[in-house]
Image: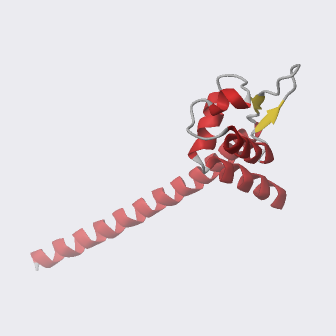
Amino acid sequence: MAVVEDDLSLVFSALADPTRRAILERLAHGDATVNQLAEPFAMTQQAVSKHLKVLQRARLISRTRTGQSRPCVLDPVRLDAAVGWIERHRQIWADRHDRLDAHLAALRAARDQDEGEETTR
């Protein structure tokens, strides 16, 4: 379980940055080189490379070699794992929310009944 948590921590940490999320969105449309990924950002290619290293460490992207080019490729497996974790916990949280709603409704009903009995006295 600790390995999964470490992988998830890397993924969520990588996803915490808007630039890295934008890079992943771009890669969802196809492979791209560092220069292509750096184009829309007001930052150096070196800064983009640092973001790419974080994404690689989280195993959200990989680099391939095509001749002289080393395009970045989206690797959705870790994203799928993060989505699975979120879905499992969303269900737990939704169940807890539903139980809280039911409990609050019961408290309101009891309060309304008590108030109704007081007015008939």
Q: Which residue is drawn at the image coordinates 29% and 67% (left, top)?
A: 108
Q: Which residue is drawn at the image coordinates 76% and 29% (left, top)?
A: 73
Considering depth in this image, is 14 or 120 the residue closer to the camera?
Answer: 14
Residue 5 picture location, percent across and down:
76, 58
Query: What kind of colouring is applied to the model shown?
Result: secondary structure
Considering depth in this image, is 2 or 111 the residue closer to the camera?
Answer: 2
Q: Quadrant of the C terminus?
A: bottom left
Considering depth in this image, is 58 or 91 the residue closer to the camera?
Answer: 58
Q: As drawn, is 92 to the left or to the right of 102?
A: right
Q: As drawn, is 106 to the left or to the right of 54?
A: left
Q: Which residue is drawn at the image coordinates 72% and 46% (left, top)?
A: 50
State the image quarter where residue 101 is shown: bottom left
Residue 114 picture location, percent across and down:
23, 75
State the image quarter where residue 74 is shown: top right
Q: Number of callouts in the render?
A: 0
Q: Which residue is drawn at the image coordinates 73% and 24% (left, top)?
A: 31
Considering depth in this image, is 15 or 36 the residue closer to the camera?
Answer: 36
Q: Quadrant of the N terminus?
A: bottom right
Q: Is residue 10 above or below residue 55?
A: below
Residue 71 picture location, percent across and down:
78, 27
Q: Is residue 51 above or below residue 34?
A: below
- Toward the top, the furthest residue is 67
Whether residue 12 is visible, yes or no, is: yes
Whether residue 27 is visible, yes or no, is: no
Residue 68 picture location, percent across and down:
86, 22
Q: Is residue 117 above or below residue 7?
A: below
State the image quarter where residue 20 is shown: top right
Q: As drawn, is 101 to the left or to the right of 50?
A: left
